[in-house]
Amino acid sequence: MANSNLPRRIIKETQRLLSEPAPGISASPSEENMRYFNVMILGPSQSPYEGGVFKLELFLPEEYPMAPPKLGRICLDILKDKWSPALQIRTVLLSIQALLSAPNPDDPLSENIAKHWKTNETEAVETGIFLWQKSGPDCMLVANEYEMLLKTYDGS
């Protein structure tokens, strides 16, 4: 891990992620830029995502830890207004894993998916399972695919 321009905190967090990985989570820094991490999270057991492997890209901005890591469009309060410099990369990844265990329809990426979840959770779970299984062993549930499949259920 030779990147002398990195703040000491990022180096320490990276070392801990590599030496003490959280169960079901793999996070490794890119060799080209150690602010980029390739992350894989196993779908938690007894969740709609059990058996899935979800790939993410995490980026630490120059302002980190004063600003949260960047992870695309994941709806997680600690990546927005609840971020604190006391939180770490590991905390964020564990929070995403917990979100897979218990999705929160009150803070959705897609209102249609949240509505489906609230009105028929069993069907919504089955739809989610179908989509990520269709994606193959390395997948990430994509909201617009879910909405397209949802239209086949609604007939709209």
Image (tube, grey):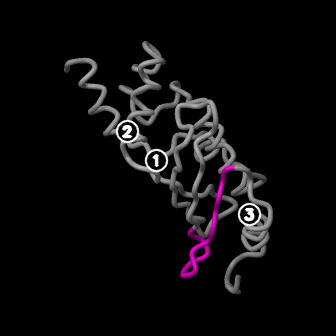
CB atoms of marks 2 and 3 within 8 Å: no
CB atoms of marks 2 and 1 within 8 Å: yes
Q: Where 146 falls versus 1 (above or below)?
A: above
The amino acid type of the residue labelled 1 equals Arg
Say which residue appears at 66% left-offset and 53% top-offset.
25
**Which percent across, then down, holds residue 33?**
56, 78
Q: Quadrant of the C terminus?
A: top left
Q: Where 88 falls versus 44 (above or below)?
A: below
Q: Earlier in the sequence, mark 2 or mark 1?
A: 1
Q: Earlier in the sequence, mark 2 or mark 3?
A: 3
Q: Relative to residue 147, is residue 141 drawn left or right?
A: right
Q: Secondary structure at mark 3?
A: helix
Residue 12's label in the rendered image is none
In space, the residues marked 2 and 3 are separated at their CA atoms by: 29 Å
Residue 143's label in the rendered image is 2
Q: Secondary structure at mark 1?
A: loop
**Which percent across, then down, holds residue 91?**
72, 50
Residue 17's label in the rendered image is 3
Say which residue appears at 47% left-offset and 18% top-offset.
122
Q: Relative to residue 123, is residue 48 drawn left or right?
A: right
The amino acid type of the residue labelled 2 equals Ala
Q: Is residue 28 magenta?
A: yes
Residue 73's label in the rendered image is 1
Where does the magenta region start and end?
A: 24-36
Number of other residues with Cα within 10 Å of mark 2, as a class: few under 14, some 14 to 19, many 20 or more: some
Say which residue appears at 67% left-offset and 85% top-offset.
3
Q: Relative to residue 27, is residue 145 drawn left or right?
A: left
Q: Earlier in the sequence, mark 1 or mark 3?
A: 3
In space, the residues marked 2 and 1 are separated at their CA atoms by: 10 Å
Q: Secondary structure at mark 2?
A: helix
